[in-house]
Amino acid sequence: MWSTLPAFLGACLLIAMSPGPSTVLIIRNALRSRRAGMLTVLGNESGVFLWGIFAAFGLTAVLDASEIAYDVLRAVGAVVLLGFGVQTLRAARRTGRAGLADAIPDKAAAGGVRDYRAGLLLNLANPKASIFALAFLPQFVPQSVPEGAPHLTAMVALAALWAVFEVGYYALYVWGVDRMRALLSRPGARRRLEQVSGGVLILLGIRLAVES
């Protein structure tokens, strides 16, 4: 596996650089606090690891083979995206002239669970993530590895490495938003960013709902 590791990490970088719903949610929550952003990252990457595990066991092949199963998950994913989008737009309205942290009371423990759950749910509700894991990970398992337990171990190890790599990558997003906090904390700027984030999430949800 060592010979394929540089190519695998390069592919992980390209995947992480591709914008998607998770990126929008991470940035949106990082606007509230660095802690909220990092917990969202950890939730999202827990989903990445779980899809990798499912792919290793061949469970995501069900979504690839069954149109009904894929459509059900696609509908759930669309509802989740629309829900997050509407929630974000409502938060933007509540922000008004106050900061978002003041507009949305957030106890540390409850908020932490919510942020982690949001990242996890958004990732697990994305059927494309499952199919991508199924197609992506096996390409980097050496051909010399036989089917069975060694093959499974290699897939799980790659899934874990994929998730850890993305934690580091998205931590840079959270750090960048935190460094710009003085600018982004202005009520008008934050409200506009919330509106853009909510609109993007809603559009992604609509696209997921109507695509074949």
Image (cartoon, rainbow, N blue to C red):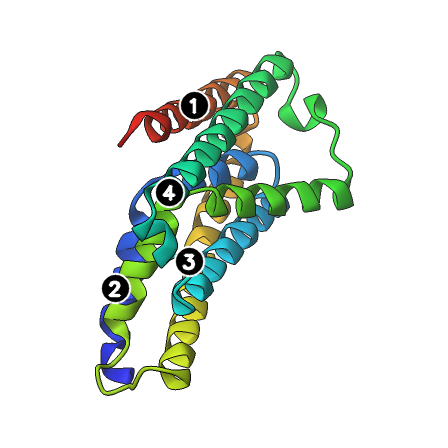
Residue 20: image x %, image y %?
36, 39
Residue 150: image x %, image y %?
38, 85
Disc 2 to disc 3, how far (Cα)?
12 Å
The residue carrying mark 2 is 10
Q: Which residue occupies 28% across, 83% down?
A: 2
Q: Which residue occupies 23% across, 69% down?
A: 139
Q: Which sits earlier in the primary sequence, circle 1 or circle 3?
A: 3
Q: Which residue occupies 45% across, 26% down?
A: 197
The correct choice, above or below, for 193 with respect to 30 in the image is above
Q: Which sits earlier in the primary sequence, circle 4 or circle 3?
A: 4
Query: Which kind of residue does numbered mark 3 sit on?
Result: Glu
Residue 48 in sight: yes
Front disc: 4 or 1 = 4
The correct choice, above or below, for 145 with respect to 27 in the image is below
Disc 4 to disc 3, how far (Cα)?
25 Å
The residue carrying mark 3 is 166
Q: Is residue 131 left or right of residue 153?
A: left
Q: Which residue occupies 31% across, 66% down?
A: 137
Q: Secondary structure at mark 3?
A: helix
Query: Which kind of residue does numbered mark 2 sit on?
Result: Gly
The correct choice, above or below, for 92 with respect to 56 in the image is above
Q: Which sits earlier in the primary sequence, circle 2 or circle 4?
A: 2
Q: Residues within 10 Å of mark 2 (few under 14, many from 20)?
A: few
- Mark number displayed over residue 112: none
The residue carrying mark 1 is 202
Disc 2 to disc 4, how far (Cα)?
29 Å
Q: Which sits earlier in the primary sequence, circle 1 or circle 2?
A: 2
